[in-house]
């Protein structure tokens, strides 16, 4: 059974991306993003939860992510949610997994490893500009999701 929905997340890569090639020659890049949520509990104490979201990117987009992203890179990922269900061959138990099939990918500049200097933007088009060719007026830093109009 498969279900589809849209998702947008921002966080940091938990490991270096892994690029594979399918038997029919398609490239697919797999990675995971840690998404933090800060909130106050019923006692007013600040708490933090972390969710780990699996992602996959196909074709040129996946190849670019594999080339430029690394563990700790701050990213904004958007795409469709894909839920897959199967029966485990060894235990016979039903299994399920939800991942984001990436349609758009941007660096947020919040990487712990690169000092926030990475504002390279990538998408499904193949005529990408390197980060050094981007205009100087593109702001760096964290994205405030409260500014997103939906």
Image (cartoon, rainbow, N blue to C red):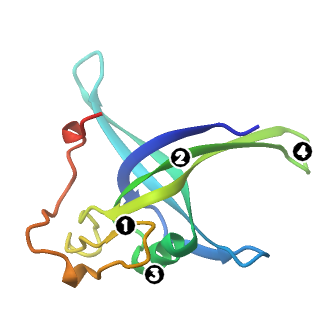
Upstream in sequence: badge 3 or badge 4: 3
Q: Could you tell whether 43 is left or right of 7 in the image?
A: left
Whole-Å distance between the Cαs marked 2 and 3? 22 Å
* Percent x, y of residue 60: 52, 75
Whole-Å distance between the Cαs marked 2 and 4? 30 Å
Residue extending farthest left: 137
Name the residue carrying label 2.
80
CB atoms at circles 2 and 3 under 8 Å apart?
Answer: no
Tag 2's secondary structure?
Answer: strand
Tag 4's secondary structure?
Answer: loop
Name the residue carrying label 3.
67
Upstream in sequence: badge 1 or badge 3: 3
Name the residue carrying label 1.
72
Q: Kindly indicate the quadrant of the structure image that contains residue 126.
A: bottom left
**Within-10-Å neighbours for mark 2: few <14, some 14–19, many 20+:** some
Residue drawn at 37 percent across, 59 percent down = 12
* Percent x, y of residue 43: 26, 17
CB atoms at circles 1 and 4 under 8 Å apart?
Answer: no
Tag 1's secondary structure?
Answer: loop
Q: For marks 1 and 3, give the one nearer the viewer.
A: 3
Name the residue carrying label 4.
91
Q: Quadrant of the C terminus?
A: top left
Residue drawn at 77 percent across, 75 percent down = 24
The count of marks equals 4
């Amino acid at each position: 059974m498969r279900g589809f929905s849209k998702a947008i997340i921002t966080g940091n890569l938990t490991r270096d991306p892994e690029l594979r090639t399918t038997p029919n020659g398609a490239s697919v890049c797999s990675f995971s993003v840690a998404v933090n949520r800060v909130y106050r509990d019923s006692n007013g104490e600040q708490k933090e939860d972390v969710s780990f979201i699996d992602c996959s990117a196909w074709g040129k987009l996946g190849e670019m992510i594999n080339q430029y992203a690394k563990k700790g890179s701050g990213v904004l990922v958007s795409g469709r949610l894909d839920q897959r269900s199967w029966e485990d061959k060894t235990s016979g138990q039903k299994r399920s997994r939800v991942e984001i099939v990436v349609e758009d990918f941007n660096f947020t500049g919040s990487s712990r490893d690169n000092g926030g200097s990475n504002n390279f933007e990538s998408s499904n088009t193949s005529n990408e500009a390197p980060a050094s060719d981007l205009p100087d007026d593109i702001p760096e830093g964290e994205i405030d999701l409260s500014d997103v109009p939906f």
